[in-house]
Image (cartoon, rainbow, N blue to C red):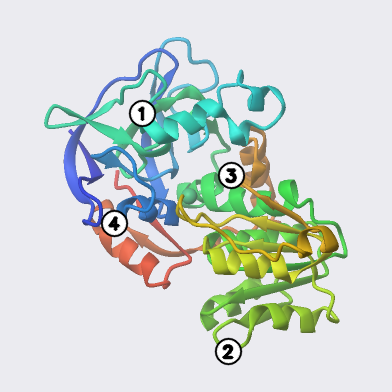
Amino acid sequence: MVKAAVLHRYGEPLSIEEVEVAAPKRGEVKVKLKAAGLCHSDWHVIEGKLPLPLPIVLGHEGAGIVEEVGEGVTSVKRGDHVVLNWVPSCGTCIYCRTGRPDLCEEAARLTATGTLPDGTTRVSWQGKPVYQFLTAGAFSEYTVVPEQAVIPIRRDVPFELAALIGCSVITGVGAAIHTAQVRPGSTVAVVGAGGVGFNIIQGAALAGAKQIIAIDVVEEKLAMTKTFGATHTVNAREDDAVSAVLDLTDGIGVDYAFEAIGRPETMADAYNMARKAGMTVIVGIAAPHETVEINAFSLPSQSKTLTGSWLGQGNPPVDYPKLLDLYAAGKLKLDPLISAVYSLEQINDGFAALTSGQNIRGIIRFEG
Ligand code: CU
């Protein structure tokens, strides 16, 4: 039997259950989880904002050790250290074929079904199937995922830090480096100083931005943004964020503005902070029904680029090892991202800390 945190009903705490995790089938890999991050996307499912089939094992920012491989698996073997990839791209859809595995149609389908590609899951509880969030289902001692969902990594990075690469780090750093392609000497504003926001800041710093303005409402988080390379901070509880950014940029606005919260109002703010012909990148996840209000005249007259970024427009097999090499070389900061470590049994405390805004990143460490 395997311990897993299962969501039975929206709005209820996760319950720690003894589940069954089957052997991997052809093209699948069984992973013994060592660490899993608590992400806002998991919380959105718990609160019912992202409706998915239940019961489900959440968790998608995970790292662990390959326990067993199914027939035909060639990229990993038993004992390999891996980071989970929650966009296991198919390699054959129009997006995969045109260099955008982050937008893979098959991975998007699996997000909606909560299953592996064959429509079933390997996790069950009391004889009934349990769905797997983003194929990962990482809040479990073991999981079985498609081969594309595991990325082999170097062995000298602690699992807690490696896990972060698979969601908050790729999402933030990738938004700055892949999506915006921040240029050396440019100006940047980041709305939302959390796990993803910090990584947008350090991505922009890695790319050589000269001015990085961090915006949030929590003073301690703003203070921490300096660790990652922010040059200025704005507390949006005290000052109007858009006016503050304009003041800091001689009334022009920034070259690149990012939103990492997922609220329509702050998305509009990020749009309004960008200069004419500048770029706004939306990274935060809003609920499916929400809309953003943007001045219609500004669209042609200010000619800004408004775009989004999913998984940091990343290509996990290439990017995850590279990001861990940057960490090992002292160029990427991972340690300060973790603000609390929990056991699987304490997972609901972790989500309480996440929703109260206390945590940068809380992480589950699995025993044994
Ligand atoms: Cu995530």
Rounded to the nearest angstrom, the CA distance separating label 3 from label 1 is 20 Å
Rounded to the nearest angstrom, the CA distance separating label 3 from label 4 is 24 Å
Rounded to the nearest angstrom, the CA distance separating label 2 from label 4 is 33 Å
Residue under numbered circle 3:
311
Placement of the N terminus among the 4 image quadrants = top left
Residues under numbered marks 1 and 2 in contact, where contact means CB atoms less than 8 Å apart: no
- Please give the name of the residue rendered at 54% of the width and 85% of the height, measured from the top-left corner: 237
Q: What residue type is labelled 4?
A: Ile
- Please give the name of the residue rendered at 50% of the width and 30% of the height, measured from the top-left corner: 107
- Please give the name of the residue rendered at 27% of the width and 52% of the height, measured from the top-left corner: 344
Residue under numbered circle 2:
238
- Residue 229 in view of the camera: no
Closer mark to the observer between disc 3 and disc 4: 3
Callout 1: 10 Å neighbours few (<14), some, many (20+)? many
SS for dot 1: loop
On the image, the x and y values in percent for residue 208 come to 82, 61
Badge 1 or badge 2: first in the primary sequence: 1
Badge 3 or badge 2: first in the primary sequence: 2
Q: Which of 268 and 63 is in front in this view?
A: 268
